Image (spheres, rainbow, N blue to C red):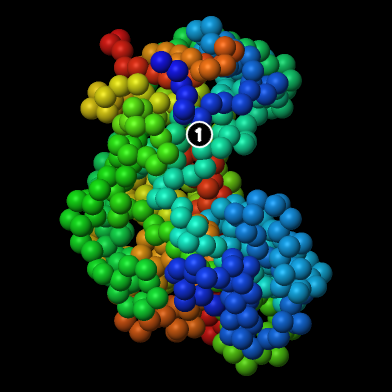
Amino acid sequence: MAITEPVYVAGAFEHPTREAPDKSTMQLHAEVAKGALDDADLKKNDVDGYFTAGIPEYESGLSPLIMADYLGLDPSYADTTDFGGSSYVSHVGHAASAIRDGRCDVALVTLAGRPRSRGQATGSGARDIRTVQDSFERVYGATNVGMYGMAAQRHMHEHGTTGEQLAEIRVAASHHAQYNEHAMYREPVSVEDVVESRVVADPLHLLDCCVISDGGGALIIVSKDIRSELDRECVEVLGFGEAIGHHDAGRIDLTRTAAEQSGSRAFEEAGLGPERVDYASIYDSFTITVLEAIEDLGFCKKGDGGSFVEGETLRAPDGELPFNTDGGGLCSNHPANRGGMTKVIEAVRQLRNEANPEVQVDADVALAHGTGGSIGTRHGAATVVLGREDR
Amino acid sequence: MSWEPRPVPEPNPETERYWAAAASGELLVRECLGCGLVYHYPRALCPDCFSEDVEWREASGRGEVYSYSTARTMSGWPEEDLPLVLAYVELDDGPRMMTTIDAKPEDVEIGTRVDVRFVDTDASDVAIPVFIPVDD
Ligand SMILES: [Zn+2]
């Protein structure tokens, strides 16, 4: 896995909206594309690679076609990988590979979605039976929150993790969200607030769950040659890894995620380990998602996540592992239920010193990690390690 | 009592035997004669070694709760089927299967011993395996 050429994130843009009843999802894609191009100081015609998980509600399966048509793109390379929430972390790695292969020089990555305006209920999901697996899962009422609830229950059983420890994750995210003027929930919450909120799927409470928001984001990833023509501060892609965890024919382990593999692959490629990470964006569909990822990425030993997150560990700017300084999916934004994009964007902001000042970390190396699908059945894991150019 | 209006499985050529067996009171798992893996859900080729030499085997129907989560409200779910105790049961035959535990939530813990029961659907050749706590 030798990296031959450096690749850079040159532009990043998060849509400020959290509710967009009067816009089409495609319009949001176009708005974030424009925002990221402006941020990179590049033009639309410079784009020759395009990456998106598409528009989930369309289910057309022809995302690269409908999106290139709508956006007026003429890419020599397109990738519409959809792993769920981790997709947009994967797109960073896929774009880096495509650039290093000479398939493109300026990769545009766009995400947008409007689950809030479309009325998606918390933790619900279609009850339609489509895949082979649906007949063995959805018939039983398997919702996302129910499956993550089972993961939390098992983690508590094996490792003594408590609801109060899971709550610490929400508390830290809410502490950061108060400084983000665009965050959906800006009010700091306490451990008591979390464990006294309504139980959605035992042992997970309402405040253990991410927001449902409209919105979007985009990234511009460029080759070394393009980077040399730009004045703007860029962020280097140091390492990337992805992996898929699944039911494994009946051997599923609800306490472990494929972050073990995606993380070690990304660290190996970057030539550094978790101790070098100054800031981490960690996918937070639920608090348990964060806890298991922290362990699996090697920030602490398996089973020690509960005690690790206690106190101020996750708080910016001075905690041992400042995380999700935008408020994350728990408090700020979870557009299209594919929050990997906002994870990458906040890591880029941290490395460019563009985070909200109260939570700006002195960071040379940042990590963004996505967990997509469900750790209760099958999930994608994607990890990217990013660094300042002058690190 | 019928399973509906909860969602019902869509049998396919790989799985119709599983659902039909359930309708006659048997829980089936797949066993690979190539590598010995006993697995769930049914697939024609072994997911470990891709052998096509796989057989149906009747499971004992016994197992224990590997994990569970209780939902007391759930949009779109029939009120009479709440609270819903979603679970993974680790069968004594090996694999962990997703299911529901037909019991009061307070009677379910990780490690609770369970036995299979079958709930009929409107289709005569499809029944749904669920589990109930047992003493043993
Ligand atoms: Zn086999």
Q: Nearer the viewer, residue B134 or B127?
A: B127
Residue at 43% in and 54% down: A285
Q: Position of residue A363 (x, y in %)?
A: 43, 78
Quarter of image, res A189: bottom left
Q: Is residue B92 left or right of residue A134?
A: left
Residue in the image at 45% along x and 36% along y: A142
- In the rendered image, the quadrant that contains the N terminus of chain A is bottom right
Q: Which residue is mark 1?
A: A138
Q: Does residue B92 appear in the picture of this structure?
A: no
- The residue type indicated by label 1 comes to Arg
Q: Position of residue A6 (x, y in %)?
A: 67, 75
Q: Position of residue A162 (x, y in %)?
A: 25, 46
Residue at image x 36%, y 65%? A331
Residue plotted at (70% across, 90% down): A229
Crowding at label 1, few (<14), some or many (≥20) Cα neighbours within 10 Å? many
> Among all residues in the image, which is located at the extreme bottom?
A231
Could you tell whether B19 is left or right of A170 in the image?
right
Q: Position of residue B121 (x, y in %)?
A: 51, 18
Q: Is residue A49 above or below residue A295?
A: below
